[in-house]
Image: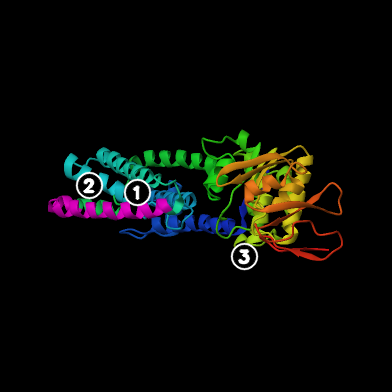
Amino acid sequence: MKALTLRAAAYSARVERRTLTASAALVAAAPALGVTGLCQGAVWATPVEVVRALAGQGDAVVVITEWRLPRVAAALVFGASLGLAGAVFQNLTRNPLGSPDVIGLDAGAYTGTLVAITLLGGTAAQLAACSVAGGLLAAAAIYTLSRGAGLAGLRLVVIGIAVNAILTAVNSWIVLRAELDVAIAATGWSAGSLNGVGWQDVRLPFAVIGLLMIALLALAHAMQQAALGDDVAVTTGVGGYRPKAVAREVGFLPQGLVAPENIVTRRLVARGRYPHQSPLSTWSPQDERAVEEAMAAAGVADLADRPVAELSGGQRQRVWMAMVLAQETRHLLLDEPTTFLDIAHQYQLPALLARLREQGRTIVAVLHDINQACRYADHIVAMRDGRIAAQGPRPPSWTRRWSRRSSACRAWSCPTPSPARRWWCLTWPGRGSSRCPGRGRRTRAWTPWARRRS
């Protein structure tokens, strides 16, 4: 789904059409629902009477503006806040179940409220303080338990569901053990009610919610990057470990990346521009140029409007590579960038990296193909069993002894049409020829992968 770029002077933003349509529909429906809420009550008021009362005219001014309006405003603001909280948690956990009511935060807040009602007397200040404290303690417990084997969205959700079940059982036990009037009050607080809400009750919550929404706007792009995974988020400047200044210098492409649901190729590649953006100016012609050039270089320009979930493994790998290229860093760290690629792209991508190297960029890549390493690398570090077996410049210094130390294979170099290149033939011990096949002969060598050359 294509995104729209909205610009106003030096400020810009990119939003998906579906998101913009849904948001516009909700914004249009909110006033209509608000007027309907103001009309309802013990005595029905017509929309005309509501409008006149809001203007300070008519006999229903007190009923509409002092009694009903605070409740309607509280319903709209609190409802929007709950929806926003759910969206934030779902984005951070990368899971539709990552909602405060599912992962135990609501249950923790209710536990704090029950403590205030049953032990402290249950004043308004005590209820507010204890409910916030209970929610924060539940969040701290979930976070601590989730950090054991590395913080991950699915792990956090599963542990949150378990904590929610435990706290729900504790809350039920407290209510059953409490006196009848206390239990009724606690149950009513759990269900929630806006009856009796006045302006003096909502001023402070409205101010706090407004400040939190401003903070969320400043963090919106960081949360979008977090949806790509912890590794990508950190290396693109999200979090306290890697500032944006570092993310503008170093690009990282790990393995096993998972794209957000329903995101299209262009939007995913555009995430690579995050380190170059500010909270106010989020998109520019330079960003557009970088994204287009990155997609063209990675060969995914024709996939720009296709959902990433519909692409093959090799196509997705090229899309991720385009995102790293769009980051426009001087240093690239690539973990098996040719994985899942077909034969053509297995050689096109290293050639692209060679051109980037000629532009002055530093590239560190993990490869399992010795021929690719020998053809394109300036310096090779051979690993075996987690240790460095050999290292040095690319051939001719790469010797048979090195190949045996690093891969337990026998190897020899063969001439290629390019005088500056050598083709390395590998055989397992005890198999294959002891010399290179002659130029012009059609042969098949015993190797971990079969190769045919003429």
From the image, tell me which residue sits under label 1.
105
Q: Earlier in the sequence, mark 2 or mark 3?
A: 2
Three-letter amino acid code at the position of disc 1: Leu
The nearer-to-camera label among 2 and 3 is: 3
Q: Nearer the viewer, residue 100 or 129?
A: 100
Neighbor class of circle 1 (other Cα within 10 Å; few <14, some 14-19, many 20+) is many
Q: Position of residue 372 (x, y in %)?
A: 73, 51
Q: Earlier in the sequence, mark 1 or mark 3?
A: 1
Mark identifier at residue 310: 3
The secondary structure type at the circle numbered 2 is helix
Would you place residue 203 above or below residue 88 in this image? above
From the image, tell me which residue sits under label 2.
114
Q: Which residues are magenta?
A: 155-184
Q: Is residue 355 visible?
A: yes
Residue 197 in the magenta stretch? The answer is: no
Q: What is the CA distance from the residue labelled 2 to the residue labelled 1?
A: 14 Å
Quadrant position of residue 207: top left
Q: Nearer the viewer, residue 41 or 139?
A: 139
Name which residue lies at 64% across and 44% down. Answer: 382
The secondary structure type at the circle numbered 1 is helix
Q: How many marks?
A: 3
Report the side of 62 relative to 125 (left or right).
right
